[in-house]
Amino acid sequence: MSHGCSCHAQFGREQLEEIEKLLEPYSGQPGSLIQALHKAQNVAGYLPREAQVLVAEKLNVPLTRVYGVVSFYSLFTTKPKGRHKIHVCTGTACYVRGASRLLNQLEDQLQIKPGDTTKDGQFSVDVVRCLGACGLGPVVTVDEDVYGRVNNGKLDDILSKYSRE
Amino acid sequence: MSQVSLTIDGIEVQAAPGTSVLEAAKKAGIKIPTLCYLEEINEIGACRICLVEVQGARTLQASCVTPVAPGMVVRTNTPAVRHARKLNLELIMSNHPQECLTCPRSTNCELQQLASELGITEIRFSGANPSYEPDLSSASLVRDPRKCILCRRCVSVCEKVQQVSAIAPQERGFNTIVAPAFLEPLGDTACVNCGQCALVCPTAAIHEKDQTAEVWAALSDPRKHVVVQTAPAVRVSIGEMFGLEPGSVVTGQMVAALRKLGFDKVFDTDFTADLTIMEEGSELLQRIQNGGRLPLITSCSPGWIKFIEHFYPRLLPHLSTCKSPQQMFGALAKTYYAEKSGIDPADIFVVSIMPCTAKKFEAGRQGMNGSGYQDVDVVLTTRELGRMLKEAGIDFNSLTEEEYDHPLGISTGAGVIFGSTGGVMEAALRTAYELVTGRTLPTLDFKEVRGLAGIKEASVDLNGTVLNVAVANGLANAREMMDRVKNGKRYHFIEIMCCPGGCIGGGGQPIPTNKEIRTKRAAGIYSADESMPLRKSHENPAVQALYKEFLGEPLGHKSHELLHTRYTARGKY
């Protein structure tokens, strides 16, 4: 997702109109469902019901199938994401080097579970499987930034840095 | 095209190119066990029960999705095949609740039967079982995801045959669930309640909402006068619940059985089917004469009604305003019959026996209380009636035939054929022809509108006016018809039945219901028609008396109050 995105934006008529425009090339093409969903998610960072209905209508795919794809792939989300998106790698290497301790710390300090967003909309936390940087494990990413060999102290610093931005 | 030659279990087999190994084996008399397979509807190789050995292939192949090839050598009964099938079944069973003793599908469950056939004698694996609760939101159907084996038959039927797509697989892995989008309650979706999903479910993951307890309670309440009506299609299918051949016409035994259960009067929906012809036929002639909205489309099938309300709301003015025969019956039972028999309508309890799950929803629709009370109190499916008869210990097959009660049990052959696709059309044509031309029909059978084809068309000459008619069954075909209407194709009258084959293939009918069984039930319907002394609705003496004593005339004031209704445009989502 590019920096230009408005991930924490409220969802409204404007966003729907933007999605509608983006879906134009996929009109009547059920086979382009995943691509279309990517485009639609880029608009607000998540796919609320209205956005999925729009995709269903435009591509001529049953809504049950649209939601089936959205709920199948972890890349799609139906919940709004935070201003900063934290991903904790729990692939094998990161896991054995303490990823679960980092997750516990995040759950404690932010009071949210993976998949959720803090009440103030500042952070969302998700779990990923292997970012391909196993030598640096445990790895945490915030938005586009990658942090390696993260421990509890380092995570504290990271959180305080982004809670001001 | 030339045939493909292959060997299955040492037998030379010829099959058309493109045939699956499973089908080719079946033709050669070799049975390969299946679970997710549903001929022409769900052929996806998901359950891995139909595995076979194909010489030269690295792994075992799912025979339902493996096409025949020249010189192929297939073996269906080797130690490796038996081992793999058994293991796959054990894994499928590993998160299936072990509740067979109390399950509504016990003794009629494909999973149970397969476990027995494949010789599963112990549960070796215990898999993670997601804790999804049963969905009780629908008036017609219950989803119990715990019992779902994810075969996707229901999904295919809903998507391909009915084109409603109310359910699909959601989430992933162990959490996978067949459900509406956003796991919304089924009762809040565009599900039309047709129950075709319940008909093809191998287990009890989707089944009818059982309302037998309400009927038992009414039957044992001395203050209640409990009357029952039986839909046309039930008399050719209820016998299957007692081991009879599909299509056996058991009208007399069914009437006797219902009396034994304790119903005070046993009446027939065929009576109000005849009445529907009088009302709907008059509506058609009126619309033709007065330049009203054409084509007129039938309104007997509640699954179809909900479908058009969700998906083609702009075409609602084409629908006949006639209530379905079930609802006309309820309204008359609590007015005309109550008056005639001197019984307080508040004490009358109307039960319907229907081949249909959508009728349960219909009975609760707004406006279905023209009598001042809920017109139909409880709707039971053919399957529920079968269960009640068993519970009562009634030996169905040895019953002596009995007659329906008067007057709401008097009917004609035209009423019976409402049970099959094309039947409403044929019944209407028999009456319209005679009323318009004033001549007696030379032959009663309109064969062009009979049969299980998805869409049928015919033209009938009524004294110089040519009537273009069409008949569709199954909602995918209904959709095709609606698109033709939208695109300006001209018809006068269209019959639509929601379920494939019409009510004989209804979602409340005995399981299994397949093409072969539908064909037999349809044959039963037409033989029941032929055996009736009267075969035209307008000749029904009880209907004639009803107009004379009570209603006045077709489309009259009283008819409008009791027998006609309105429809609601509903959103798709």
Image (spheres, grey):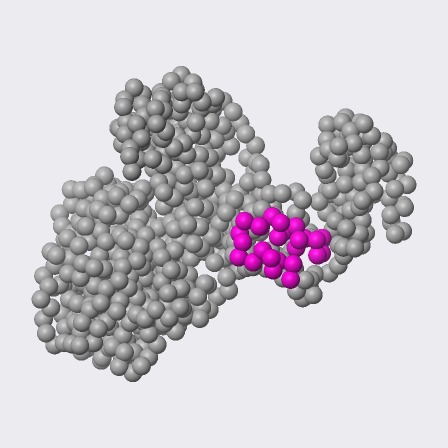
Does the magenta run of residues contain A44? yes
- The one of B258 and B223 positioned closer to us in this rendering: B258
Q: Quadrant of residue B432?
A: bottom left
Q: Quadrant of residue B376?
A: bottom left
Q: Is residue B172 left or right of residue B570?
A: right
Q: Which residues are magenta?
A: A21-45
Does the magenta run of residues contain B446? no
Q: Is residue B66 left or right of residue B228?
A: right
Up-down relation of residue B459 to residue A143 (above or below): below
What residue lies at 21% left-to-right and 46% top-to-bottom?
B520
Up-down relation of residue B60 to residue B456 (above or below): above
Q: How many marks?
A: 0
Q: Residue furthest bottom?
A: B290
What residue lies at 60% left-to-right and 46% top-to-bottom?
A71
Up-down relation of residue A84 to residue A12 (above or below): above
Residue B547: x, y in percent?
A: 20, 76
Q: Main secondary structure of the magenta part?
A: helix
Q: Is residue A91 visible?
A: yes
Residue B365: x, y in percent?
A: 41, 65
Q: Is residue A38 left or right of residue B262?
A: right
- The one of B242 and B169 positioned closer to us in this rendering: B169
Residue A69: x, y in percent?
A: 58, 46
Residue A151: x, y in percent?
A: 86, 33
